[in-house]
Amino acid sequence: MGAAVIGFGYWGPNLARNISGSNVLRLDYICDLSAKNRSMAASQYQGTKVTGSLEEILSDSSVGAIFIATPPSTHFSLALKSLDAGKHVLVEKPLANSSKECRILIEKAENRGCTLMVDHTFAYTGAVRKMKALAASSLGVLQYYDSVRINLGLFQRDVNVLWDLAVHDLAILDNITSLKPVAISATGHAHVEGYPANSAYLTLFYEESFIAHIHCSWMAPVKIRRTLLGGSEKMVVYDDLEPTEKIKVYDKGISLNPSSKEKYDLRVDYRTADILSPKVDGREALASMIEEFANAIRTNSKPLTDAMSGMRIVAILESADISLSKRGAPIDIPII
Amino acid sequence: MGAAVIGFGYWGPNLARNISGSNVLRLDYICDLSAKNRSMAASQYQGTKVTGSLEEILSDSSVGAIFIATPPSTHFSLALKSLDAGKHVLVEKPLANSSKECRILIEKAENRGCTLMVDHTFAYTGAVRKMKALAASSLGVLQYYDSVRINLGLFQRDVNVLWDLAVHDLAILDNITSLKPVAISATGHAHVEGYPANSAYLTLFYEESFIAHIHCSWMAPVKIRRTLLGGSEKMVVYDDLEPTEKIKVYDKGISLNPSSKEKYDLRVDYRTADILSPKVDGREALASMIEEFANAIRTNSKPLTDAMSGMRIVAILESADISLSKRGAPIDIPII
Amino acid sequence: MGAAVIGFGYWGPNLARNISGSNVLRLDYICDLSAKNRSMAASQYQGTKVTGSLEEILSDSSVGAIFIATPPSTHFSLALKSLDAGKHVLVEKPLANSSKECRILIEKAENRGCTLMVDHTFAYTGAVRKMKALAASSLGVLQYYDSVRINLGLFQRDVNVLWDLAVHDLAILDNITSLKPVAISATGHAHVEGYPANSAYLTLFYEESFIAHIHCSWMAPVKIRRTLLGGSEKMVVYDDLEPTEKIKVYDKGISLNPSSKEKYDLRVDYRTADILSPKVDGREALASMIEEFANAIRTNSKPLTDAMSGMRIVAILESADISLSKRGAPIDIPII
Amino acid sequence: MGAAVIGFGYWGPNLARNISGSNVLRLDYICDLSAKNRSMAASQYQGTKVTGSLEEILSDSSVGAIFIATPPSTHFSLALKSLDAGKHVLVEKPLANSSKECRILIEKAENRGCTLMVDHTFAYTGAVRKMKALAASSLGVLQYYDSVRINLGLFQRDVNVLWDLAVHDLAILDNITSLKPVAISATGHAHVEGYPANSAYLTLFYEESFIAHIHCSWMAPVKIRRTLLGGSEKMVVYDDLEPTEKIKVYDKGISLNPSSKEKYDLRVDYRTADILSPKVDGREALASMIEEFANAIRTNSKPLTDAMSGMRIVAILESADISLSKRGAPIDIPII
């Protein structure tokens, strides 16, 4: 099936590389409004048509799949047009700028019988798949998720740090557990005149005894990507910057009535059991994501990161923005 | 001057060791209600009287300084009695269970002309003193403080994790900056029936463009003690578990209009300047703290961690508890 | 049984503390020639006689065990006197300055029916015991031992770095494997006029296909204590500075005919299997060592680190010194 | 000037990418005997002629520069042919299989007036250039170089681990200091029937008080690339796997007459001064290397890694192989 990549800026080239490397899709078109990006695309993909016109692509019946990697503000209109043209669509995260827009896209996809999917890349990484498997098998009752996703980043004007970084953790949470968040408290700060919040803290309250917290920032001197997932039986540490030990499983939960020996050990901070670092599949996540998309189209089935998951996450971000503007006042999250 | 240690459980022995090692105080008494603790004290400090009676100590005119290292719930009554007896008093953190109690102790100390001090040990560590010096000299306008203080800890019944762990960061903040917090949003969870919150997240909103966040937990599989202090000119990372590089100074703030080269570097996460890890004074903090106490008594001056700082921190913890019970609803912090 | 510690400088206090903490030995005497050290001992151990005279101790029939923690050059004469007096003797490493001296001590101990043991502390640590167990069970055929034991250390005049640091690895090797070294090549350098070698490299050639290498130095800016133990089935990394993950077991040996996938993984340095960090017994090694000594005396049995092991290690160090003076020329190691 | 890459296996593609990215050379040809590699090259470089015939390239007068990235055993003959044809030649390390071959190539290059250069890539990395600058400016008298270059690698049949890994450190040493090695002691082991040594230890003895040691292995469970460079004034740690702090400068050498405070600090392993991690140029080394080659051709000047340096390193490897076969017996290194 023929495919087209819309937007050849930062992320588009990664999509193009993986599409041309896949054996289920054919990279027919690359589309970008910038001449500079088009010439770069042309030099790298001789066999591929490079254009500035989406219409040209939508009118080509040999093209079945559209990959949208343009700025967030354009996701909605481009996806809507593509679905209207009867194309299957994959959209970069976030799916759209509001849950209202998401709903329109979802209905349109249903009406046209097209597959609509969002690129929550992390859901396809070996590390997150391993975490999900552990959560399902051996962690016991999930108790908390705590993630730090900070670095010295580019300050963006059009979107705050939640929509740029926290979205990844929301997608991971949506993927590894079926528990639903019911309320959110968000705090943060915009340190620079005329720029949106660059550092933020999110607490998600879930049904049952589960809680999640996400710290995201463009303003940290060090890069950290570290997630803790705590269960009643075992706990996981996921460090995405670790080259070889991304996932560590701690063979111990909390102990409420520790022996005096345990008490002493905890005081002097002894570890209390074995630690296992399971091998994690190193395959590139984007390749798996594209396979999932192609497979969902072929079998007309629901992909792992379907449009509904994209809408759930956008809805949470909307609630977060409200809480953020109210210094952490708790905001209910609509059930979707 | 003669000194007495009240409470010889977990922290008391550290006080006793440092008092007996100091050349300004004389360890006359150790007091504990538990016979087991008393016999341990007796075997270690032959020259020192060991008793179960506070009265015996308060009636001994050769004793000038009282160190209270008993459970928090007893701090108020024991400190009040000691001040009534005209003794100078150092109390373990927290100073008391409420700001109301703190105020009573402070007034009593003033009436009796006694020194009242709280043991915020971290204020006396080489690392925190270095951070304070950097904040005053080269960081520029302070923008944020972010601290993670988590480990697999003992679950306590009488006090939640805020009063056990966050209190340290509040003391560090009170010490390194004169900026005052105006409101707080706290979230967290008590995962175990009949136990208080074991994991909590605090956001402190300050006057001007400064924000602080503290993550404390007894439920993490790994021990982390890492603090970021961001300024407009430089940023500091303080890792208290680092044996030799506790403090790192990053010679770069954020860049709003990065060159395309910088943009690329930030994408691939290049560091953008030199990193300096200054040597930090390794002297034991408790020794300095005891010196400060003795010096404050001798010169009748205000110690670094005076009772007012203890009260400010208790007031913040009170506000935090309210916010915690309201899922992060922002609570004003009284000006003290 | 009564015990005496001879030498209260750097190591003696650790022995004294563990003896007084043990329930099988009674700390009757501490002996040191320095008045300063004696007064320090007196203040810490009120119940214990402190003296400058070894004779006084040897003539006290209630004393059964002598712990010698004096400078290496004095080990031989002090141990010999103590054995002559019919005392059981534990000597700090190295057992003596030459294998000839070791042999004399061993014969004397046999004649007097006394236990003679050397304090190879590492053999009693949880980490080394775990390595030994792994070597015996799951590593397969042992292939190599590689240890780095470096730091910015005190330059010593009386002994070179081999006798100060490499001795620990030789003791670990002697303990974890029954394979015998047959030849040695040692290189190194004395960078400072009038001081012995401060950095050295040892290669031990063993019977069968096993090889060991030790890098020890007083001249490194960083402290490293890292040992690799390679087997045909699994490999172990032992990092003694790791607070909680001292031992890691890599579930993979080498692959001679790797698949192209494996080849790629190796190129990009992917790890090839799970990693396990087993919990290691955190008990203080000296306590176990003292128990072993007391037990060997009581049951008149051979202790784990008996005098013969001490002699084997001294013999290796003698050969190493010769090779060191010949720029690595291989020297045969006598079979003992 | 036109350029050709001979050999499109593991390293050739990196050369091709950097040549096509340079603005001083034009990638005219890629040559490989394997049809599979040729088709891969063809798909990636449409504008470039792909051939299996070196002669075709050598007879094309528009080609001035030949890059040889074939197996070591072929370096000599291919380089000789290319020089005979009057081409400028860059050869992958090692320059050839013997110093005799190196000498023939050097003389041929002189006779033909061609530039002959060896690709010692590390000499062009920002980290090594920083180390060289530090060695020249602030380290004081160089005292030692110690490098660990180990990982779980592919076992090679045609060349032992010295020629595969140690060659990098020899090139770094040749580059950062003008001191000359006078003798070498090498030990190691071939653990697998029919394969050359897979683990080796090299000690290089230099004129004056400088010593170097290299540990290289294909058989370690962990990847380590860590080099210490010690001077009388300061010491450097270079960790090539560190993403952001490759170089650390320790502001302290050894102290011969430490104060008792220093002694204590060293005992408890305190660091003794500030640590600086200078920013290192992140530019790809191969790009600089190709620039250097083009510039040497244009200006007919001696490049940084000229053929003489390649010959010096091959001569050291020859001596190392002899010592390796004699269990570390010291072998003199010929002055070149």
Image (tube, coloured by chain):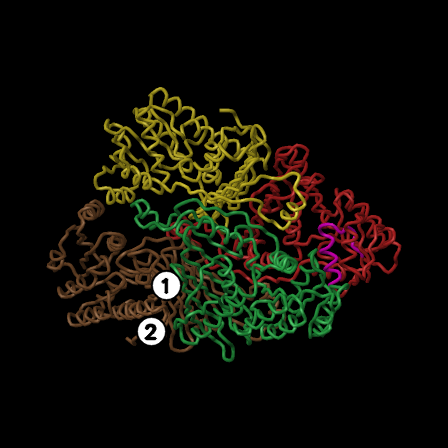
Chain colours: A yellow, B red, C green, D brown
Residue B20 counted in the magenta span = yes
Left or right of A308 on screen, residue B53 = right
Which residue: 63% across, 40% down?
B184
Crowding near the residue tagged with mark 1, few <14, some 14–19, many ≥20 C-alpha atoms within 10 Å:
many
Q: Where is residue A127 in the image (x, y as percent from the top left)?
A: 43, 40
Q: Which chain letter goes with mark 1?
A: D
Q: Where is residue A261 in the image (x, y as percent from the top left)?
A: 65, 46
Identify the image quadrant of the N terminus of chain C.
bottom right
Alpha-carbon span between mark 1 and mark 2:
15 Å
Residue D143 counted in the magenta span = no
Q: Which amino acid does label 1 sit on?
A: Gly
| Viewer-closest of C212 and C107 | C107
- Check disc 1 and report its element: helix, strand or loop: strand
Left or right of D146 on screen, residue B233 = right
Q: Can residue A324 be seen in this view?
A: no
| Viewer-closest of B323 and A160 | B323
Which residue: 41% across, 41% down?
A280
Left or right of A91 on screen, residue D65 = left
- Check disc 2 and report its element: helix, strand or loop: strand
User: Residue D291 appears in which quarter of the rendering?
Assistant: bottom left
Q: Position of residue C42 (x, y in %)?
A: 75, 67
Q: Name the residue under label 2.
A: D331
Q: What residue type is labelled 2?
A: Ile
Residue lying at the far front in this picture: please name it: C111
Magenta segment: B4-21
